[in-house]
Amino acid sequence: MTTFSTSIKSKMPASTVTKGKALVADDKRSNRMILSAILKQIGYEVIQAENGVEAVELFQTEKPDIILIDIIMPVMDGYNAVKQIKSDPANSFTPVLFLTGMTDEQDLAKCIEVGGDDFLTKPFNRTLLTAKIHALERISILHKQVNVLYARTQQDQEMAKEVFAGAVITDNVALNAIQTLSQPAELFSGDVLLSAYSPSGDLNVMMGDFTGHGLAAALGAMPASEVFRAMTSKGYSTQQILAGINSKLLNILPTSMFLAIQFITLSKYLDYVSVCNCGMPDILFLGTDDHIIKHRAPSSEIPLGISTDIDFNECVKLVKIDLGDTILLASDGVTEALNNNKEPFTNKRLESAISERQAGKSTIDSISNALQVFCGGASQADDISLAEIPCTPEVLQAIKCDTTDNQYETKSVTDFNCSSNINRVDFNISLYGRRLSDTDPIPILINHIHEIEGLAEHRRLLFTILTELYTNSLDNGVLGLHSDIKNEMDGFSNYFTAREKRLEQLTDGYVTIAISSCTTPNGGEMIITVKDSGSGFNYSDYKCDKSDYSKLSGRGIQLLTGLCSSITYIEPGNHVEAIYSWCDS
């Protein structure tokens, strides 16, 4: 096998501009020489091949910038040579110009079918040949520019993906207990799953679905996650968090974009869940043993980012759960997934996958398998997201509680160091009448404590203490609700229904919270005093009894006795003093 690399003289001066390397493949030496002369005139370095096999080998070793090739050659024709050249993974784009004596339309059409970029019949006109070479050069330049832009875009997207993961995904909690499935339709998903613990120990989980998918849809997840985490960490309620996210999105999203959400707050006691569904498929509650669907929470409001006219107090519902239940969140990309016949997966198939779950398999595994079988090789049109939240202790953040024996002492405030004015700070807040129904003082107090005393590592315990004290005063004192109602059938539903009704009708009453905090040589003490306008209660009935901890009433008081150094109830029970102590490590 012989390869010719020929340089011939020409009457026309050679170009001083170097355009790269050109491969000329023709079994006739005279044709190669003529083409070489023209290409050198244009500014190319020329390499030559006598047949298709040589052309493929020279392409692989020399990496030419343009190829001029004949069709009919020995050993391997031009068609098969170009097929191999174009199928080479290392070939980004090398323009191919067929030069042939064939005139049949089918033969010429095949030049393009096998990967050629243009053709010219022999005998060819020098001017037309030069013009076609220049045209292929422009195409090659554009292709390289596109590749550069594509590589830059990929790099930017990978960087954005890392930033997105760090800002949105990394801080999620309970990842060892919550099973998820995320299948983006593109590099970025318009679906977002967020989870965080509140200071009281409750678990907030939100699944969101932004309009569309890809990077544009994912951008909205960052401000939404920022509000979600900030307000959850400060102890705001489900309603307040949703209102905060809605307000943020209204300010930054274009009018054509919005966020449908499923939001749950799982109680630290694993007895009920606060649920809100705005524009998403039903939230499904699955039973403990048979895994049947025992409850559905359908959409009751429009998605976030559309209007300020959303009553989150109305759309947040309470659902009673049993230990071991699971909660299934799913985006509409699941039920609307299409197969090759453009048929949707539908809710019916989703529920069949749940009921047909095999032993030892999770619900998400069952749904994922059903989706794969149904969709086959069909292209994915929308993001697919699933989350399965077990209602078990493993999903919660345990509250460290050291129960002592002096829970109901009658010590006076003057017995403690905070009675002195040394290193002491006092502040209080009082809420009256309607303010009790529309203001949550606990996040305000916690932030105030944090700014004055720091105590970052004690934030969660202090939040729990303040929340329990305030809730007891508001519910049992001002509203006159008895927590024993919770022990009855449908007790939670009846309790919270009555609570909402009494809050709406509330016109008088008060709750005052006073805090005295001081430092000691080894740490510090904080006295929290809560008074309400209620008639009080017989607190001796709720003394800590571990055997009765399973009861739904009185658990807040039992929790307080374990978290505080001392709890003192003052007759008739509408005045309580709690002392929380800490040591410097």
Image (spheres, grey):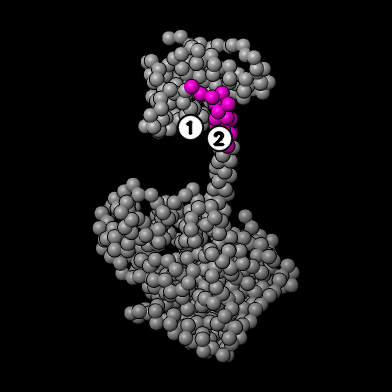
Q: Do the residues labelled 1 and 2 touch (CB within 8 Å)?
A: yes
Q: Quadrant of residue 21?
A: top right
- Percent position of residue 499, x then y: 47, 83
Highlighted magenta segment, given as a residue range? 123-144
* SS of the residue under disc 1: loop
**Which residue lies at the image location 65% right of the left edge and 65% below the top edge?**
450
Which of the pair 540/356 is nearer the observer? 356
- Seen in the picture, residue 257 relative to 505 is either above or below; the reply is above
Q: Quick check: 279 left or right of 295?
A: right
128 in the magenta segment: yes
The disc, 1 or 2, on the residue closer to the chain's N-terminal end is 1
Label 2: few (<14), some or many (≥20) within 10 Å?
A: some
- Percent position of residue 439, x then y: 59, 78
* SS of the residue under disc 2: helix
Overall secondary structure of the magenta section: helix
Mark 1 highlights which residue? 117
The numbered mark at residue 139 is 2
